[in-house]
Image: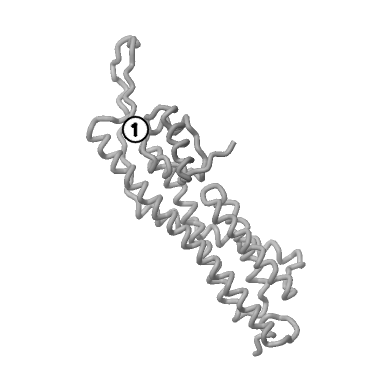
Amino acid sequence: MKLSSLFNFSPKKREDRESLSAKITEISIKLKDQQDRLDEAMRKLEERDKDLFDRVVRSQANGESARATIYAQEISDIRKIMKIVYTARLAIEKVRLKLETIHDLQGISLVLVPVSRTLENLKEQIRGVAPEVAISLDSVISNVNSITVETGTTITDRTIIPTVDEEARRILEEARKTAESKISEKMPKLDLPHPPSDVGLPHPPSEIKVVKRKMTEEELLNHIKINGGIVDVDLISTTYGVDKNEVFDLLRSMARKGLVMIEG
């Protein structure tokens, strides 16, 4: 069977067919680049998770249950982000595998259209935690849609569209379940005791001494990356036990060094 019949369009010059195949390969390469980005994000999140877990253990050993709880909450937030990132990574892998089957199928619309729908949904899910990946996926989606137009394979049959949407949902759901399972297996479980209810404090003390710690640029930068570039000074001050003015000073210092860009 000739390649032209596989793609279901009228015979053209050989270079045109090769160009189409090259475009599909280029899309797969771009998706692989996004997988690599997500792998790097996962590596950083795992390092942060391990660091915070060690702090939980130390805080518990020192009898600082309140501090241990704060660290544990941040670990919980990080693991939610990890599930989103890993789900995206697995979904992209499934999309790349589907693209590889195009050369063996006549109806490429049944491959390209679900791929486009899957990437659209994925882009929205990942936007908040990996905006640069979402932007790149937007470009890939445009490329996929261009191919469907060029080959005349855009689906117009309304009876097929629900099947296409279901296929996209199935890909994402399979990726999500696998991600949850893998992360649950890989990450150590948190076992925090409930804070004692009978602390027996006297009447409200006249003065409460709050010990403030110094925050490093690296800690602040990691926090910013984990939270998708959003800086909540109140949250940082509470979570890390640092003064708000210190956070502002650090941000200004990091901006001068070109580590962050302050908007608004």
Q: Is residue 228 above or below residue 112?
A: above
Total residue callouts: 1
The residue positioned 57% from the left and 39% from the top of the image is: 263
Quarter of the image for residue 179 reads bottom left
Quarter of the image for residue 192 reads top left
Q: Secondary structure at mark 1?
A: loop
Location of residue 58 in the rendering, given as x and y in whole percent from the top left corner: 25, 38
Specify the amino acid type for callout 1: Lys
Q: Is residue 168 above or below residue 70?
A: below
- In this rendering, position of residue 42 left or right of residue 17: left
Residue sitting at the far bottom? 1
The residue positioned 33% from the left and 11% from the top of the image is: 205
The N terminus sits in image quarter: bottom right
- In this rendering, position of residue 9 left or right of residue 256: right
Location of residue 9 in the rendering, given as x and y in whole percent from the top left corner: 73, 81
The crowding category of the residue bearing disc 1, from other C-alpha atoms within 10 Å (few below 14, some 14 to 19, many at least 20), is few
Q: 145 or 189: which is nearer to us? A: 145
Q: State the colouring used for the structure image.
A: one colour
The residue positioned 36% from the left and 46% from the top of the image is: 49
Location of residue 187 in the rendering, given as x and y in whole percent from the top left corner: 35, 51
Identify the residue position indicated by label 1 in the image. 214
The residue positioned 54% from the left and 70% from the top of the image is: 29
The C terminus sits in image quarter: top right
- In this rendering, position of residue 253 left or right of residue 50: right
Residue sitting at the far front? 256
Q: 67 or 198: which is nearer to us? A: 67
Location of residue 6 in the rendering, given as x and y in whole percent from the top left corner: 66, 83
Residue sitting at the far left? 61
